[in-house]
Image (cartoon, helix red, strand yellow):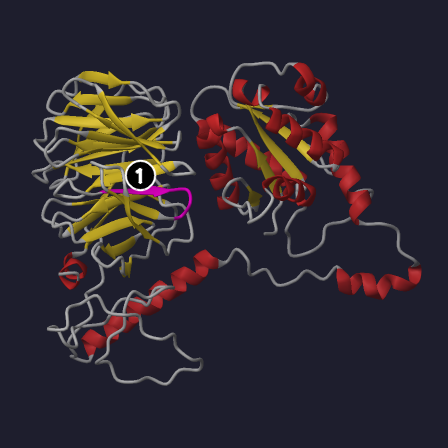
Amino acid sequence: MAHDVFISYTIADKAVADAVCHRLEEAGVRCWIAPRDVGFGDWGASIVEAISEAKLVVMILSAAANASHNVLDEVVTALDAGATVIPFRIEDIRPTGALRLRLSRLHWLDALGAPLDQHIDRLIEVTKRILPAEADEVPPRQEEQPLRPLEETGPLLQAAEERRHRQEEPPRPPGEAAVRKLEETPAPKTVRRWPATAAVAVAAAVLASALALTLGGSFRTPPITPVQPAATNPSAPPQPAPAPQPAPRPSVIPKSFTAPAPPAPPVLLRTLTGHTGYVQSVAFSPDGRTLASGSWDSAVKLWDVASGQLQRTLTGHTGYVRSVAFSPDGRTLASGGADKFVKLWDAASGRLVRTLTGHTNEVNSVTFSPDGRRLASASDDDTIKLWDPASGALLRTLTGHTLYVISAAFSPDGRMLASGSYGNTIRLWDPASGQQLRSLTGHTDHVLSVAFSPDGRTLASGTIKLWDVASGQELAALTGDTDWVQSVAFSPDGRMLASGSSDKIIKLWDVSNVNEAAK
């Protein structure tokens, strides 16, 4: 993977590192971050190769990073390779030991205090000043037009920029002028034009739908075929194609249903705004009247589904709120966060009832069993813990995942527990014995959320796929989100699916037809 920036961090600062990576890539800066970009084979060799290919290294500087031998090794490797290192200080600490020696002459960017996004904005600005400009024309050489550094970057970053120009543009003999002019002609810029391409595709789809209605035909236009289609329509007439089509995948629809009509595409019903950070979790109350959302702004919000109005905001977490879940009777709301705690709230009053402790790393997911007698929490400590919410006692710890457990959900009958991890897989467990029942594969990125439909036949996973639980077959892929889908949740009647993503938007989907196909 070609990249410009290597991000160095410890597991304790993963949330900040992920946010930095996301914002930099959103701004057009290619990043390398573990474990996302680590290839198969030697982990250490992958790190060294990634650092050697990076033009700039962003180091998340905290107390944990100060004590990390791995971070020190990465900083040393980067400096030896001639890369520019920017310490991004998120805690008010001073480096000690060998790290102090290495960072003493480097300029730091402070990210102390909220909001984090403002500090990342500054980091993006500095990063773009250091990296080569991606303009349509090659800018004049350094000696012809000196780069004016930002005030905070100081002489060090200016010197790094000058060294880079000298390395990248060695002297050429006069006879190579024509060759040089050809080499400096910028290539067509197509890498980052996907938003415009997507807009054209959407406009084309809308125009096609309008034409279908104008011509008086029945509006049965099937959804746009996803990258990995879940199924094919055997009754559709053959269409000429410039390239061979993939073989039809086995159908999960019973044989008694011959030639079913394709399901209608999901419909966006309403958009709720109010959070000041990424929305990472959403959950419906059992009566379907209230929607809870957890955000990187450390707040839990309760919304009225019918009107879209904000009812109340719950505060108490000291870090990002990663997951929210209602108890089956709707009286209790559980939340888990980056502060390693699970909190239980009175849903009616917003009062904090109890705080559960025991995880050694961030809590990514919380979910109640259908009878309300157990609460499951999934964590970056690679475990799933089962709690008694009435007493706060720890009942059982499930182990087996080898990479961060990001999400967990009980089936409606309580006999199955689904979990998703950074390993891009979904696992189905027997919560009573701890035995793994099935593994679902098909995602090409981290599985950040899982949720069963009320009838237990369908499992939703972000970003967003619908699965047949019995067979493990993929039913559909919902497209349209422009960022990571952090959470998914079904409405009590199973006809709606809510999704919350890193673009700070909550979407409501009509998935009733897709669920019918799974029956």
Query: At 60% from the left edge and 28% from the top edge, which residue is drawn?
Result: 71
Taking 44 as reference, is 470 above or below it?
below
- Residue 76 lies within the magenta run: no
Name the image quarter holding residue 33: top right
Name the image quarter holding residue 87: top right
Q: Percent position (x, y) of residue 85?
A: 66, 31
> Image check: 252 left or right of 4?
left
Mark 1 element type:
strand
Total numbered circles: 1
Whether residue 415 can be seen here:
yes
Q: Examine the residues drawn in magenta and state their main secondary structure.
A: strand
Which is more toward the observer, 408 or 429?
A: 429
Pointer 1 residue: 407
Whether residue 500 can be seen here:
no
Q: Percent position (x, y) of residue 103?
A: 68, 22
Query: At 62% from the left edge and 23% from the top edge, which residue is drawn?
Result: 108
Q: Percent position (x, y) of residue 409?
A: 23, 40
Which is more toward the observer, 367 or 22?
A: 367
Q: Percent position (x, y) of residue 21?
A: 51, 39
> Image check: 228 left or right of 307?
right
Where's the C terminus, which quadrant?
bottom left
Q: Which residues are magenta?
A: 417-424
Name the image quarter holding residue 450: top left
Query: At 75% from the left edge and 33% from the top edge, which residue is drawn?
Result: 80
> Image check: 492 left or right of 155?
left
Query: At 46% from the left edge and 19% from the top edge, which residue is drawn?
Result: 113
- Residue 419 lies within the magenta run: yes
Which three-letter amino acid code belongs to the residue tagged 1?
Ser
